[in-house]
Amino acid sequence: MRGVGNYASFFGKAPAISPKYNASIEALRVVIDPKRPRAAVLDFVAGHLRDAFPHYSWVGVYLLEGETLALAVWKGAHATEHARIPLGQGICGLAARTRETVVVPDVSKDPQYLACFPSTRSEIVVPILADDHLYGEIDIDSDALDAFAPQDRQFLETIADDLARYLK
C-alpha cells in the first residue's frame, strides 16, 4: 500500500513568481487536501490570504448556488452586506459571467462596483473554474488604490485552480 505523500501531481508545479507567493502556494496546498472538510479548507485559505498579504484588506470566497454567488467564508474587519450576489451583478457577477479574472484598480471609477466598505479602493475577483464549470470565486478588496500587481493575479489564479480541483 502506498503511503500519503506529495500532492504535486494533484496540483502541478507552482508558477515562477516571488518567493513569498510561492511559499504561500506551498502552504495552501498542504491544506487544500481532498481529505479535509470544505469549510475548514476555505476558512484556512481566506485567513491565510488575509494574514499573509497586508494589502488584502478583505478576503471572501463565494460558491456558486444555482444563479447566485453565496459567501462561504470571509476574513476582514467587517462582514459585507453582499452575502448573496446574483450572477452578472457587480464585479463578482461580472467575473462569474465572463469566467475571467477582473481587476479594478479604482473602484470609484467602475459603475459595476457594489460598495461593501467605504475604505475599499481596489478589488480583484478570480473565478474558481475547472473544465468550464464555475464553482465560485475568490474576492479580495484592498484599501489601497491599484493594489493588485500582475503577481497577485497569477498567484490568486493558481490558488483558484487548486481550489477548483479540490471542489470538483
Image (tube, rainbow, N blue to C red):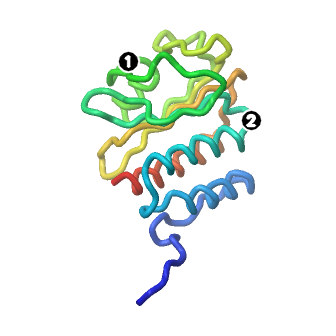
Give x and y (percent) for residue 28.
59, 55
Q: Give the structural element (helix, strand or loop) at label 2.
A: loop
Which residue is pictured at 64% across the width and 10% down the height? 118
Residue 47 numbered mark, or none = none
Q: Residue furthest left?
A: 66
Give x and y (percent) for residue 127.
43, 39
In the figure, is residue 166 to the left or right of 14?
Answer: left
- Give the answer, above or below, for where 120 lies relative to 58: above
Q: How many marks?
A: 2
Front label number (1 vs 2): 2
Q: Amino acid at mark 2?
A: Pro
Which residue is pictured at 31% across the width and 27% down the height? 68
Which of 76/66 is in front? 76
Which of 148/141 is in front? 141
The mark nearer the N terminus, 1 or 2, is 2
Which residue is pictured at 60% across the width and 48% down the height? 155
Q: Quadrant of residue 47?
A: top right
Rounded to the nearest angstrom, the CA distance separating label 1 from label 2 is 27 Å
Q: Give the structural element (helix, strand or loop) at label 1.
A: loop
Quadrant (top left, top right, bottom left, bottom right) of the N terminus = bottom left
- Disc 2 residue crowd, few under 14, some 14–19, many 20+, Cα 10 Å: few
- Disc 1 residue crowd, few under 14, some 14–19, many 20+, Cα 10 Å: some
- Which residue, given by chain and number where applicable, does mark 1 sit on? 89
Quadrant (top left, top right, bottom left, bottom right) of the C terminus = bottom left
Which residue is pictured at 38% across the width and 37% down the height? 63
| CB under 8 Å between discs 1 and 2 | no
- Which residue, given by chain and number where applicable, does mark 2 sit on? 54
Q: Quadrant of residue 52?
A: top right
Give x and y (percent) for residue 160.
48, 47
